[in-house]
Image: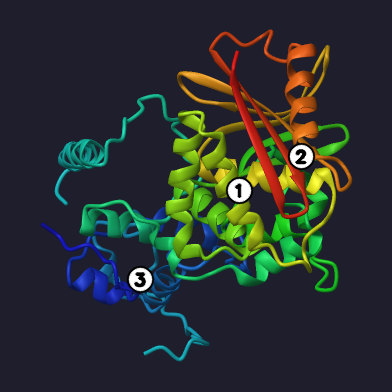
Amino acid sequence: MKKLPTSAQSFEVLRQAEYVYVDKTKYIYELINSGRVYFLSRPRRFGKSLLISAFEELFNANKKLFEGLYIYDKWNWDEKNPVLHLDFTDLAYNTPEELKSTLSNFLDKSAEGNEISLRNDMPVSVKVYNPFSTLLLFEKREFANRWFRTGTPTFLMELIHKHNRPQAFLETIILPSSSFESYDPDNLNEIPLLFQTGYLTVTNKISSIDGVEYTLDFPDREVKDSFLQYLLSFYTAYPSESMPEMFKNISEQLKILDAQGLQDSLTALLAHIPYQIRQESEAYYHSIFLVWLKTLGFNIQGKISTDKGRIDAILKQDDFTIIAEIKYGIKKQLEEMLETALKQIKDKKYYAYLDKKIILLGIAFNGKEVKCKMRKL
């Protein structure tokens, strides 16, 4: 069985040592014949170094390395081209059927071992995947957030903090094409920058007479979960290493209607928010709470409009649905705000169109104080 190239960035080494290589030379051939100058803006660990190495060997007419590949009978091997290589880092299977079968067996075993249900309705056109994470999954035979761990997006987090709109990552992100055309260093928009750095990817393109719009989303669960955890840790200054245990506790508290436990958990998170970034407004606490729950993996809808009014948040799980109403006030009593929140949900019948078990959740904030009440409908 061929070796997995988890550390091979040289095309020559990869081919001579008979590592697994997914033939990308069709795309190399198309690139060469469709343009002249390219800027490769994919983020780290997406194979840029290996791609450039393949270009180098191709232009050096190293024919033997390309035997059996798409480009082999399409390239003029009699012509050798000079290659200028500028390195700014200073850092030193057999048939398709067999591949499909072994890959399927491996994925089934990995899913079973990790209690994951494989879906058969995945679209044919996968938007993006990270080859580094995939290779390490095959090598280590366990899931882990490997790509995200290779670097921390501190600058991006500071930019998101500067604009103070974390709720943007809880909603569908739609941007016009003009948002990607200019990058003013003095006025950076964090969403296009997150796309350029690989934290977001394009999931849909809509063309109209008004122009082109793109829908963006996280490319996979690894990036989504890691990014939201890092974002929450950055916003609350709560230790990132303590986040998993906190998330586990809050999830269990919501499931068993432990209002006091949820209140204690939220109090602990609030206590870590530096006063410099705290905003005394209902919108701020609403956004922070939704980021917390989104990070927990809850299916969240925020600010849902009905014929009776606007619901602050709906948290959907397989066997129950939580309707949350959030209140904030400096001069109001927490207990008074809680009763107002729960009464608002019942009076306006926000739950009328829902058919699962309904749980009402009222949350009241007053600076660093928070109080919660939960009721079954």
User: Residue at the left extreme?
Assistant: 1
Q: Which of the 4 image quadrants contains residue 306?
A: top right
Label 3 neighbour load within 10 Å: few <14, some 14-19, many 20+: some
Q: Which of pointers 1 and 3 indicates the residue nearer the eye? A: 1
Q: Quadrant of the N terminus?
A: bottom left
The percent coordinates of residue 219 (x first, y second) are 52, 47
Q: Tags 3 and 2 in contact by the CB under 8 Å rule?
A: no
Nearer to me, 343 or 72? 343
Identify the residue position indicated by label 2 in the image.
Answer: 334
Please tell me which of labels 3 and 2 falls first in the chain.
Answer: 3
Question: In the image, is 246 to the left or to the right of 373?
Answer: left
Question: In the image, is 90 to the left or to the right of 21?
Answer: right
Q: Amino acid at mark 1?
A: Leu
3D distance between C-alphas at marks 1 and 3: 66 Å
3D distance between C-alphas at marks 3 and 2: 78 Å
The percent coordinates of residue 165 (x first, y second) are 77, 52
Identify the secondary structure beneath mark 3: loop
Q: Amino acid at mark 2?
A: Leu
Please tell me which of labels 1 and 3 falls first in the chain.
Answer: 3
Q: Which of pointers 3 and 2 indicates the residue nearer the eye? A: 2
Identify the secondary structure beneath mark 2: helix
Q: Is residue 162 above or below residue 305?
A: below
Identify the residue position indicated by label 3 in the image.
Answer: 77
Residue 228 visible at all: yes
- Point 31% across, 75% down: residue: 62
Nearer to me, 12 or 47? 47
- Point 81% across, 44% down: residue: 283
- Point 36% across, 58% down: residue: 133
